Image (cartoon, grey):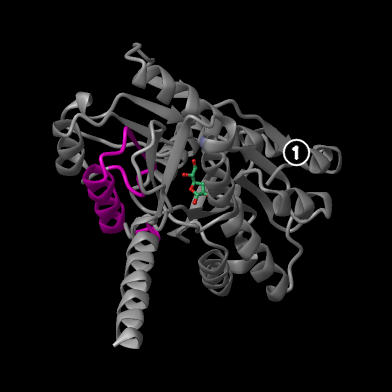
Amino acid sequence: MKFKKMMALVASTVLCVGMLAGCGSTSSSTGSQSTSSKSDKKVIGFAQVGAESGWRTAETDSIKSIPTLDSNFDLKFSDGQQKQENQIKAIRSFIAQKVDLIALDPVVETGWDTVLQEAKDAKIPVVIVDRNVTVSDDSLYKCFLGSDMEEEGKKAAQIVIDQFGKDAKLNIAELQGTVGSTAMVGRQKGFNETIKDCPNYKIVKSQTGDFTRAKGKEVMEAFLKSDGDNINVLWSHNDDMAVGAIQAIEEYGKQPGKDIFIVSCDGIKDMFQLMADGKSNAIVECNPLLGPQLLEVSKDILDGKDVERSIKSKESQFLQKDAATELPNRQY
Ligand code: GZL
Ligand code: ZN
């Protein structure tokens, strides 16, 4: 009898320990761990686009550093894998977990009204970071924190004009970012508007490479196959696609940065290295280090303070002659 009693005791103990361990981590789509009791920390739920580029992972690292910048904050993270439906699911999960604030980096600009209305109904403030949303009701989010993507497109075009002059005859190949994203829409608009009074600038090729290296290489290969000997300039909406395109240009037998002038956006280390190696010509910086600014604006919102509707990130531009000196300063 004694043995049986002892076994029953052991079994119930094991069962209790198992249950305790289970309630210590959330199984939400964010995959983040959180303490079993609702601590008095403020929790930010961050619905990220994906992990498609060096810029993206740098932005993720910066925003994930918020709890180390301020121990009163906790962060739940979700990688949307570049799919809007995953981001919408993540926002609903954050609402269910009653986070204090939601930060969204929207893969594309439209399709957010319903889920942002749900966050508003749940009285959870929303901050849009990096890319922007187009919504019918501006009260669906408190503030936009990110770049002026049109400005980035204008800077890229001005670099080409400074290099070749307004009257040059140029065939330009364009690697577009994710179709419908603020980065793609803004950069394309800014570039095209700026080359308007350059009568002999022609965009002879334009296709999306979805901001990835692999797709950028694939699309550039197709551009080269169909019109490779006539392309003078490659305008890439981000560095990662340009990295892929540079490989394609070399495999095609041309010299990137010499036979084809290359300008791209972001400012990742790999691109500075390629520029220092003479294989690219200019970078329009896009700042991914948004963690500290997101923390500040979140604090203000949660303290009930008014915040600016739009907070622009600080960013610069670099030419090939700047690459070697700037390279050691790059953090991502
Ligand atoms: C720009 C950001 C873009 C980067 C790409 O702010 O949204 O998305 O330029 C990233 O590298 O994929
Ligand atoms: Zn930017």
Tell me the quarter of the picture where residue 330 sits.
top right
User: Residue 326, percent across and down?
Assistant: 80, 38
Seen in the image, is 150 located left or right of residue 14? right
Residue 319, placed above or below residue 264: above
Q: Nearer the viewer, residue 248 or 298?
A: 298
Task: Depth check: give the residue in front, 287 or 118.
Answer: 118
Q: Is mark 1 within 8 Å of ligand 2?
A: no
Kindly identify the amino acid type of the residue bearing the numbered disc 1.
Leu
Task: Check if residue 85 falls in the magenta segment.
Answer: yes
Tell me the residue that label 1 is attached to. Answer: 319
Q: Residues within 10 Å of mark 1 (few under 14, many from 20)?
A: some
Would residue 186 be seen by someone viewing this image from the given angle?
yes
Depth check: give the residue in front, 231 or 292.
292
The stretch in magenta equals: 80-109
Frontmost residue, 142 versus 218? 142
Residue 259 drawn at (x, y percent):
74, 58
Q: Farthest top residue?
A: 306
Residue 79 rendering spot, x and y as whole percentages: 41, 56
| Residue that appears at 45% across and 52% down | 177
